[in-house]
Amino acid sequence: MKLVDAVKPKLEAQGVSVGPQLRFEPVPADARELLRFAGEPIALQVRLLSKYSNNVVAEQLTKSLGADRFGAPGSWEKGVRALAEHVVSVGAASPGNVIADGSGLSPRNRVSSATLAALIRASARSFSYGPEFLAALPLGGRDGTLETRMRDLDATVRAKTGHLQRVASLAGVVPNSAGQPLIFVLLVNGARGSSLDVDAAIDAFVAE
């Protein structure tokens, strides 16, 4: 789908009449601003991303991160470079890691469990964004992509799910018997069973 085809129905839905010669060009220097819209806070966007595994939000936030770090316009290349820099800055880099996109959908992605565990640990401990990070993770048996999983656990699990064909993952935090947080990362590649069976095995591991 062309960008024009995607934008036209959005404009028309808001009562903006669109002619047949719609085109995209740089904004003229003498253009007059008609409307400015303030988007939702980043913390809320991250919450929507994590709770419901919204890949579109993930990609857009990646581009926004790239624009913020390396200048507009945002792009996947800039965003991926910014993500890679952050992984290094928190000491989570591992040999062989490949970050190909912001959503994790690309088969070229290669991220180790050690890297994910280090990122979760650094994020949870961050004074700047740690509380927002943890609050954005789905709660086992309560909401998001974990609403129907781990309902029988006494402990509260906060974790992010991940699924591709024959791939399943779960990474997050669960308290131990003393209430101290334990970080776990489970990556299953080449699974032979059904996705439901694989998820059940992952949940059983977390429960244990």
Image (cartoon, grey):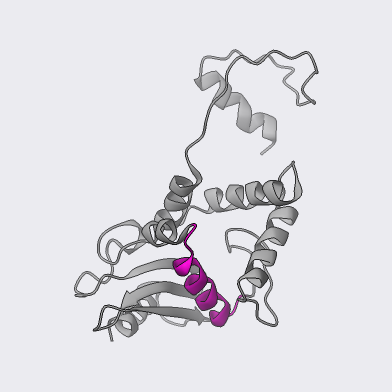
Q: Is residue 108 visible?
A: no
Image location (x, y in percent) of residue 74: 71, 45
Of 200 and 133, which appears nearest the observer?
133
| Side of 202 relative to 102 (left or right) | left
Q: Does the magenta run of residues contain 119? A: yes
Quarter of the image for residue 148 reads bottom left
Quarter of the image for residue 98 reads bottom right
Image location (x, y in percent) of residue 38: 52, 30
Of 128 and 169, which appears nearest the observer?
128
Q: Main secondary structure of the magenta part?
A: helix
Q: Is residue 146 above or below residue 200?
A: above
Image location (x, y in percent) of residue 18: 64, 15
| Magenta stretch in the rendered image | 111-128
Image location (x, y in percent) of residue 9: 56, 25
Q: Residue furthest bottom?
A: 208
Q: Is residue 21 above or below residue 47?
A: above
Point 62% across, 76% down: residue: 91
Q: Is residue 146 above or below residue 111?
A: above
The quadrant in which the N terminus is found is top right
| Side of 203 relative to 192 (left or right) | left
